[in-house]
Image (tube, helix red, strand yellow):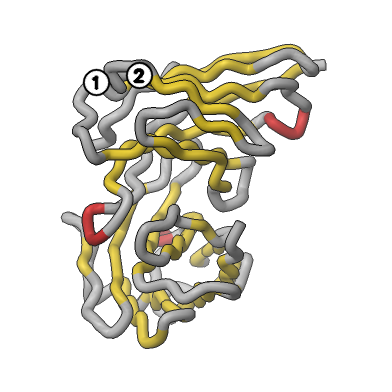
Amino acid sequence: GAVVSQHPSWVICKSGTSVKIECRSLDFQATTMFWYRQFPKQSLMLMATSNEGSKATYEQGVEKDKFLINHASLTLSTLTVTSAHPEDSSFYICSARQPGLEAFFGQGTRLTVV
Amino acid sequence: DAKTTQPPSMDCAEGRAANLPCNHSTISGNEYVYWYRQIHSQGPQYIIHGLKNNETNEMASLIITEDRKSSTLILPHATLRDTAVYYCIVSYSSGGSYIPTFGRGTSLIVHP
């Protein structure tokens, strides 16, 4: 299947700082990318959907000013967690797809805010 | 809200077939059934999807009932590495309506 690469795999940051997570589709052009968050022993929660060149659509309850999503090209989307706090510690997962095909997922990024 | 219902957990002996059910009674005519699995601390892995015909690939088989209100994912010869959480997702195939939304899934444990 298609490959979606996330970077970094894990990151530890201090409270109040910002963290950027990259999501790349390596062998296909992703017109749509999704960002999820997963807390321990819970399912994936969709945070936002982004289409290349457009503003992201955020799910209810997700602060768009805190979780900045940029989908500037067909192979790259970034999620920036601004002014991170310990409650933002979670497993963040991106997904990418091209029209008519299934979505493929990155390996996830474990964020720990201390 | 997820539009599927799955048992929270199942177990299976290694080498035997694992049959994972999913109910999707409100599925509409153009919605597909997708299956993904997530091994601990990794991103979900695509397994298979179908519309109304049964499907088979190198990983699994998907059996969809004639009324399309339920389906079964079959892992024909389960191995220990198939231990994972399996998610059944119902969604349109194209356009902005395809948004993989996850329910709680089924935690499958394959034991020796």
Left or right of A2, for residue A36: left
Q: Name the amino acid, label 2.
A: Ser
Location of residue A67 in the rendering, given as x and y in whole percent from the top left corner: 31, 72
Residue at the left extreme? A60
Who's the residue at 24% across and 20% down the image?
B25
Location of residue B8 in the rendering, given as x and y in whole percent from the top left corner: 46, 20
Q: Chain of mark 1?
A: B
Q: Is residue B82 above or below residue A54?
A: above
Who's the residue at 52% across and 64% down the image?
A111
Who's the residue at 57% across and 47% down the image?
B45
The number of discs equals 2
Q: Nearer the viewer, residue A9 or A114?
A: A9
Q: Chain of mark 2?
A: B
Whether discs 2 and 1 lie on one chain: the answer is yes
Location of residue A80 in the rendering, given as x and y in whole percent from the top left corner: 39, 77
The answer to whether the residues at label 2 and label 1 have Cβ atoms under 8 Å apart is yes
Quarter of the view holding residue B29: top left
Residue B70 is tagged as: 2
Q: Which residue is tagged 1?
A: B25
Circle 1 sits in a helix, a strand or a loop, which is it?
Answer: loop
Left or right of A60, for residue A43: right
Q: Is residue B60 above or below residue A29?
A: above
Residue B38 appears anywhere in the view: yes
Q: Name the amino acid, label 1.
A: Ser
Q: Residues within 10 Å of mark 2 (few under 14, many from 20)?
A: some
Where is the N terminus of chain B found, in terms of image quarters? top left
Whichever of labels 2 and 1 marks the residue nearer the N terminus, that label is 1
Who's the residue at 42% across and 57% down the image?
A101
Residue at the right extreme? B112
Residue B8 appears anywhere in the view: no
